[in-house]
Image: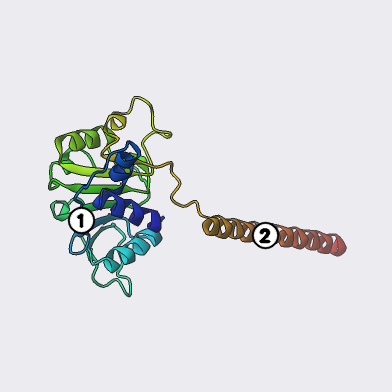
Amino acid sequence: VADVALGYLIGLARELFAIDRAAREGEWEKRRGVSLGGKTAALVGFGDIGRALARRLIALGMKVVVYDPNYQPVPGLESVECANWPNRLEEADALLFTCALTADNHHMLGPAEFARVEPGLRIVNVSRGPLINEAALACALEQGRVHSAALDVFEIEPLPERSPLRALSDRVVFGAHNASNTEEAVERASLRAIDLLSGFLGSKAKAGVAAKESAAARESAA
């Protein structure tokens, strides 16, 4: 998932997706992107995926500001700074979502938050669609406050035909909630599920044996 988030961000920064679309139409555009080194990435969520992504962003020379109510310092990521949402959002050149969806963060990025950001913001969401108010995102894109967005997830999946984001396809990259789908990840998840199931069935079997032994002991005593 961290790999996909980084891929989306690089694609948005250098406008690779737009260049691809233009080249397919026979055009030869020379779009001027932005370098990521020295820029600030606002990262929402600092769990396994967030930490993995932070390492990648720092490797590119980016400053990382994290939003996570359960933030804990991590060895090797001492340069990461923590802030309370939405403080310091105006510093962000990129905003990336890697957090879980809860009742408290539904539509955490909406009109009030978009009003804080500086024009040119790139947004990447590989977490859950309802974190972002998509109608407000469409407005921010139309107004130029948000430069572009890469969305692997949506409020309603698949993305409805009536979504206002479809009219902005030159500024938005669509995914299919597929960021975790690699051969290695599927194998790890399958093996983990087998281990958990084996442990559960093993404990049930042991409990059954113990219950039979206890019943036999009671009958013997009687």
Of 157 and 67, the residue lying toward us: 157
Task: Say what secondary structure mark 1 lies in.
Answer: loop
Quadrant for residue 202, please give it: bottom right
As drawn, 188 above or below 174 = below
Between 12 and 5, the one lying in front of the other is 12
Q: What element carries label 2?
A: helix
Mark 1 highlights which residue?
Answer: 84
Q: Is residue 172 left or right of residue 160?
A: left
Label 2 Cα crowd, 10 Å radius (few <14 / some 14-19 / many 20+) = few
Q: Can residue 104 be seen in this view?
A: no
Picture coordinates of residue 166 (x, y %)?
A: 31, 31
- Res 198 label: 2
Quadrant that contains the C terminus: bottom right
Q: Residue at x 68, y 61 (%)?
A: 203
- Where residue 85 appears, x then y in whole percent? 21, 52
Judge the density around disc 1: few (<14), some (14-19), many (≥20) Cα neighbours within 10 Å.
few
Q: Can residue 184 be seen in this view?
A: yes
**In which image quadrant can residue 24 be found?**
top left
Question: Is label 1 in contact with label 2 (beta carbons under 8 Å)?
Answer: no
Q: Is residue 204 above or below residue 168?
A: below
Q: Which sits in the foreground, 106 or 36?
A: 36
Q: In which quarter of the image is the N terminus?
A: bottom left
| Farthest-out residue, bottom | 75
Q: Is residue 107 left or right of residue 89?
A: right
Q: In this view, does 80 lie to the left or right of 160?
A: left
C-alpha span from label 1 to label 2 = 42 Å
Question: Is residue 174 or residue 27 the one in the foreground?
Answer: 27
Q: At x 19% / y 50%, what residue is drawn?
A: 32
Q: Name the spot of residue 214 as percent of width and height, x first.
A: 78, 62
N-terminal-most mark, 1 or 2: 1
What's under tag 2, amino acid-wise?
A: Ser
The type of residue carrying mark 1 is Asn
